[in-house]
Image (cartoon, helix red, strand yellow):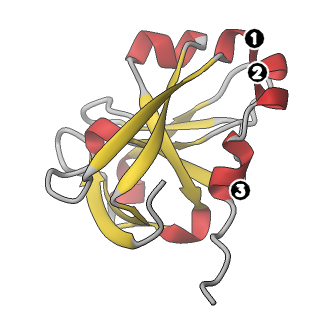
């Protein structure tokens, strides 16, 4: 979407898990219908792992849930239960940031796209989601 990056802050409900992420002010967020995301109502945008940073002390409140292939690492706060980010199966080199967990004021626009997690293999082959965790090409 947008190319100029800003620093977004966010985290969980109880604020024990806090992070910052560099991403455009306009992002593409994926609404996934897999068994986990659909139950949580999760919609997320993907960034390269190097653009995401946990605040000091946040990791002591995180716990991880995996299932199926165990590639996705669903991180959630063990105090309030909110998944404000996770490592997605589609982008194990990136971080999926829950759009609703970004603090107000820095996201100018969110384009929502559907991710067919129930039919993951077929959907992944025809989607462009794996490109979202790749660093943007340097401006000339």
Which residue position is annotated with label 3? 93
Quadrant of the image occupied by residue 60: bottom left
Q: Residues within 10 Å of mark 3 (few under 14, many from 20)?
A: some
Could you say where residue 139 lies in the image, as x and y percent from the top left?
Answer: 60, 85
Residue furthest toward the bottom? 140
Q: Nearer the viewer, residue 77 or 100?
A: 100
Sequence-wise first label, 2 or 3: 3
The residue tagged with tag 1: helix, strand or loop?
helix
In the picture, the disc for residue 123 is: 2
| Nearest to the observer: residue 63 or residue 40 | 40
Residue 75, how many percent across, how many down? 49, 40
Is 26 positioned to the left or the right of 88 in the image?
left
Q: Residue at x 25, y 52 (%)?
A: 108
Rate crowding at label 1 as few (under 14), some (14 to 19) or many (20 or more) other CA atoms within 10 Å. few
- Distance from Cα at disc 1 to Cα at disc 3: 21 Å
Reply above or below: 50 against 102: below
Does 43 appear above or below 10?
above
User: Which residue: 63% across, 39% down?
Assistant: 88
- Residue, x 65% and y 56% (percent of image)? 133
Q: How many marks?
A: 3
Q: Which of pointers 1 and 3 indicates the residue nearer the eye?
A: 1
Mark toward the start of the polypeptide (1 vs 3): 3
Task: From the top left corner, tell me how far across and down residue 51 is, in percent.
Answer: 51, 69
**Depth check: 31 or 20 in front?**
31
Q: Which residue is mark 1?
A: 119
* Furthest-front residue in this view: 140
Task: State if disc 1 and disc 2 touch (CB < 8 Å).
Answer: yes
Q: Is residue 123 left or right of residue 7?
A: right
What's the residue at 67%, 41% (across, down)?
129
* Disc 2 from disc 3: Cα separation: 19 Å
């Amino acid at each position: 979407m947008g190319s100029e990056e800003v620093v977004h802050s966010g985290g969980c409900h109880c604020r024990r898990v806090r992070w910052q992420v560099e991403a455009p002010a306009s992002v593409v967020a994926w609404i996934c219908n897999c068994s986990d995301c659909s139950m949580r109502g999760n919609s997320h945008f993907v960034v390269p792992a190097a653009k995401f940073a946990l605040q000091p002390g946040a990791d002591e409140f995180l716990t991880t849930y995996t299932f199926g292939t165990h590639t996705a690492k669903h991180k959630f706060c063990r105090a309030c239960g909110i998944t404000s980010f996770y490592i997605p199966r589609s982008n194990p080199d990136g971080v999926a940031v829950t759009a609703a967990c970004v603090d107000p004021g820095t996201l100018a626009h969110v384009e929502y796209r559907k991710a067919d997690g129930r039919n993951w293999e077929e959907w992944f082959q025809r989607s462009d989601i794996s490109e979202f965790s790749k660093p943007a090409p340097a401006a000339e």
